[in-house]
Amino acid sequence: MKQIDFKGKKALVRVDFNVPLDKSFQITDDTRIREALPTIKHILDAGGSAILMSHLGRPLEKLNADGTINVQKFTLNHLVKHLRKKLKTKIHFADDCVGKSAVKKAAALKPGEVLLLENTRFHAEEEKGDAEFSKKLAALGDVYINDAFGTAHRAHASTTIVANYFAAPNKAFGFLMEREIENATKAMHEPAKPVTCVTGGAKVSDKLLLLEKFLDYADNIIIGGAMAYTFFLAKKGSVGNSLVEADRLKTAKDFLKKAKEAGVKVYLPKDSVCGDKFAVDAAVQTCPSNQIPDGWMGLDIGPAAARQFAGIIRKSSTVIWNGPMGVFEMEAFANGTKVVAKACAQATKKGAFTMVGGGDSVAAVNQLKLAKKVSFVSTGGGAMLEFLEGKELPGIKAIKG
């Protein structure tokens, strides 16, 4: 986007302002807004104006009882005050992303000003990637900038189809999108050895493509989270009431065999912190991960596993981490994720390139104030996952052609 002359132009910018809000509609984590600021400021400083479009939540899946959209809950108007504070410029708001209000306010926008459009997902055409709807969005701006990596894996109207209505010189990635692509590419294609890939979360099925892709360039693969118990069950271990995918036992066995053939070391947690129920007030005990008693479930990696995993991470030159080691939102089962987060920061300090992606992994580094102590924190959970799996993302293809 540095090659575009924004002077006197209206830039239609797809941002990812899908931020968490509390019951009073106050922003609880403004990371996604902060990450988009350099792109917006560049446009304004270059003499242009910015028309911002984003989604917020899934309003069409959570309609009011009478079938209408819950505008109060899902309106982007909640973000206007925060944007004014961050950008220190005039922020206008259109109560729709297409139609008379949007057209009128876009036309009146002056250089240095910002127009925030209403939630794109108030229209079913957004997720359908409707061409006519995309054309209406495109008509609002002179150039198109996609800075929403978090939605780059969706072929939606505002993230992908809208780009078809701009000539190649008039569309580009924003700075955040550019950084996301550069860092993920560096981790996958130019990694310094040894490479350690850390994955967690609930299901093997969700991460299978990622695990198989890791075999192409990893020296070590660390598996935590509930998905580890499917592997233990596949190895004839006792996992009690732990979450497992019984239909993925052969898949788990096959993966371990492939890893051995590829010379990649796979580490499963030696021990687990177990609860007698999935609750904050559960009774807790630590057990070997392959000897969990009936009536108990593994909800975090244990202290021995945490020490081992941290040691491997600290000795690595490249670390890619996607997914928590346990039920991070429950304090009793958060330690494994915290230990991995701290180990990533320590590895970075020693010169390693560390990339963190995925909701709870990012939440962990943010909560522990370690975001600036790792090399890169991705804003895109699903998008980063698909990019690391080697898939071509529609939002990236729409700009690159």
Image: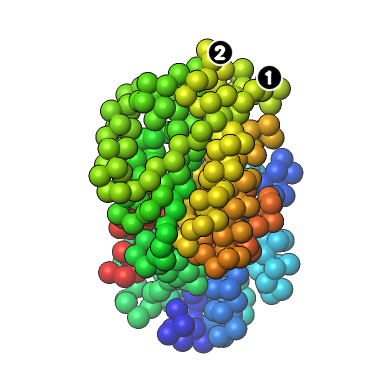
Which residue is identified by label 1? 283
Which residue is rendered at x = 39% and y = 42% of the image?
266
Which residue is rendered at x = 59% and y = 43% of the image?
307
Name the secondary structure under disc 1. Answer: loop
Displayed quadrant of residue 394: bottom left
367 vs 256, nearest the viewer = 256
Which residue is rendered at x = 48% and y = 69% of the image?
179
Residue 241, position in %: x, y?
50, 17
214 vs 140, nearest the viewer = 214
Q: Is residue 233 above or below residue 203?
A: above
278 lies left or right of 181: right
Query: Where's the N terminus, which quadrant?
Result: bottom left
Q: Measure the alpha-carbon separation of dots 1 and 2.
A: 11 Å
Label 1 is placed on what type of residue? Ala
Q: Please indicate, yes or no, whether residue 61 appears anywhere in the rendered image.
A: no
Q: Please indicate, yes or no, whether residue 49 appears anywhere in the rendered image.
A: yes
Query: Where's the C terminus, which quadrant?
Result: bottom left
Residue 40, position in %: x, y?
57, 73
Q: What residue occupies the far top of the structure in this picture?
A: 294
Q: Is residue 342 above or below residue 42?
A: above
Label 2 is placed on what type of residue? Gly
Which residue is identified by label 2? 295
- The label shown at residue 297 is none
- Badge 1 crowding class, 10 Å Cα cut-off, few under 14, some 14 to 19, many 20 or more, is few
Displayed quadrant of residue 136: bottom left
Q: Earlier in the sequence, mark 1 or mark 2?
A: 1
